[in-house]
Amino acid sequence: MMTASRLIVLALAIFAAIGVAQAQENKKPSCRSIFNICMKRAGSGHAAICEDMYAMARSKGEWQETQDENGVRYPKVPCTP
C-alpha cells in the first residue's frame, strides 16, 4: 500500500514525464538540418533541388512533401527557419 507522500511523488513524476513528452513533440527541426540531410543524400545534379526546397522551407516554415525514387511519399515537415 502506498503512502500519501509516495502517491504525490508518483503523480509529480508522471506530470513531469508528460511535460517532457509534450516539449519534445513541439520541438521542430531546423530547416537547415533538413537541408544538410538532403545534400548528403542528393546524387550528382540534385543539389539545386535541395537548395530550392531549402529556400521555400525558410519562407514557409515547413519542408515540402517529398517522394523518393521508390515512390514512397513523405509528408510536410514543420521546421524553424
Image: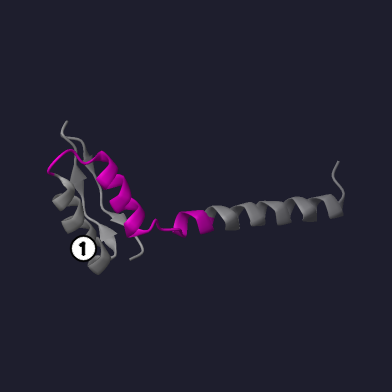
Instruction: Judge whether 78 appears above or below 72 on screen.
Output: below
Q: Where is residue 15 in the image (x, y as percent from the top left)?
A: 65, 56
Q: Callout 1 environment at 10 Å: few (<14), some (14 to 19), or many (20+)?
A: some
* Location of the C terminus (image quadrant): bottom left
Residue displayed at 15% across by 34% down: 71
Check the image and tell me how it is coloured. one colour
Q: Please tell me which residue lies in front, 69 or 10.
A: 69
Q: Where is residue 72 in the image (x, y as percent from the top left)?
A: 20, 35
Query: As shown in the figure, which amino acid type bears the numbered disc 1?
Result: Ala
Verify whether residue 40 appears in magenta.
yes
Q: Where is residue 79 in the image (x, y as percent from the top left)?
A: 34, 60
* SS for callout 1: helix
Q: Please tell me which residue lies in front, 29 or 48.
A: 48
Residue displayed at 40% across by 58% down: 28
Residue at far top of view: 70
Identify the main secondary structure in magenta: helix
Q: Position of residue 51 (x, y in %)?
A: 19, 56
Verify whether residue 42 appears in magenta.
yes
The quarter of the displayed image where residue 73 is located: top left
* Location of the N terminus (image quadrant): top right
Residue displayed at 36% across by 64% down: 80
Can you identify the residue that label 1 sits on?
A: 55
Residue displayed at 85% across by 54% down: 5
Instruction: Judge whether 46 appears above or below 23 on screen.
Output: above
Q: What stretch is highlighted in magenta?
A: 22-45
Residue at far front of view: 44
Q: Please tell me which residue lies in front, 63 or 46.
A: 46
